[in-house]
Image (cartoon, grey):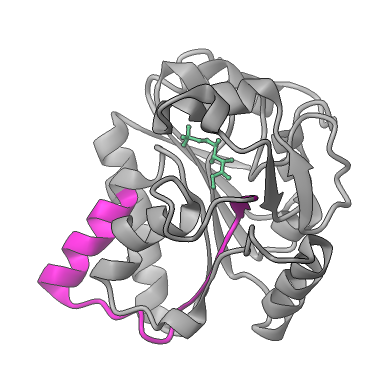
Amino acid sequence: MKIIMARNEQEMSRWAAERIIETVRTRPSLVLGLATGSTPEGIYRELVEDHRINGTSYKHVVTFNLDEYVGLKPDHPNSYHTYMKTRLFDHLDFLPQRTHIPDGNAADLAEECRQYEKHISRFGGIDLQLLGIGRNGHIGFNEPGTAFDTRTHVVRLTESTRKANARFFHRKEEVPTHAITMGIASILSSRQILLLATGRAKAEALRRLIEGPVHPDFPASALKQHPDVTVLADASACRYLS
Ligand code: F6R
């Protein structure tokens, strides 16, 4: 696991965006795994800005998002469909049929999960997966205790995750109780992984990731079993690293 420390969030976002842009330029049909949440917002802004100025094209890029809430309509302001549309997809030349986000409204959620995995395989697997990290070590919505061999599945969200995500909703009660998420095994199948962390709120999680044992109690620790993971974090998130 390689660790790169940026001075601040802005620098982290710029470096991550540069890596994505470079990869898309050398491999236009890149299969890119995307995350939502606060951490990648600056990166998406950088990608939009680069597209506007330099015209980097995403026409051939295929994307797979990590997760989506169960029960929110795609056009709900807090759905990850809306997040991706407003932060990224509407501003670049992605082809809608090449962008994928789990359907949290599918009548048969288990079947949706199976189909999602099949789609990923059909495109040859994910080349580069972006990840954030939860304070409790979750990646995607894989909460502590998730087995490392899980593929895309439905999860019940923990209270701590619902509380953390309540900032995007009017009231905590509105935060959905379930989500569809790529599993830990799905994430580990990506060829390269870029884990992003910013701010002091993530410092303890980063310390546990780097210094702690590999154990399902801390899902991100599974990444230590992957041969090509880069952790890109700002100085605040690295404050407890020795
Ligand atoms: C988002 C996701 C989550 C977040 C994590 C960190 O698609 O899968 O695992 O990456 O909750 O969220 P932020 O970036 O908001 O701190």
Q: What stretch is highlighted in magenta?
A: 43-70
**Is residue 93 depicted above or below 68 in this figure?**
below
| In this picture, residue 109 sits left or right of residue 202 | right
Asked where in the image residue 48 lies, by quadrant, the reply is bottom left
Q: Which residue is drawn at 76% across and 28% down?
A: 218
Q: Quadrant of the N terminus?
A: top right
Left or right position of 177 against 165: right
Q: In this view, does 134 lie above or below 191?
A: above
Q: In this view, does 178 lie above or below 151?
A: above
Question: Is residue 27 visible to the viewer in this orientation of the structure?
Answer: no
Question: Quick one: which residue is furthest to the left in this view?
Answer: 53
Q: Nearer the viewer, residue 95 or 232?
A: 95
Number of marks in the rendered image: 0
Q: In this view, does 41 lie to the left or right of 37?
A: left
Residue drawn where x is 56% and y is 21% of the image: 163
Q: Position of residue 198 (x, y in %)?
A: 41, 29
Q: Residue 90: where, in percent of width, then height?
A: 28, 69
Task: Measuring from the top left, give residue 138's x and y in whole percent.
Answer: 67, 34
Res. 5 in view = yes
Q: Residue at x 74, y 68 (%)?
A: 112
The residue at 53%/32% (across/down) is: 174
Could you tell whether 2 is left or right of 87 in the image?
right
Residue 68 colored in magenta in the image: yes
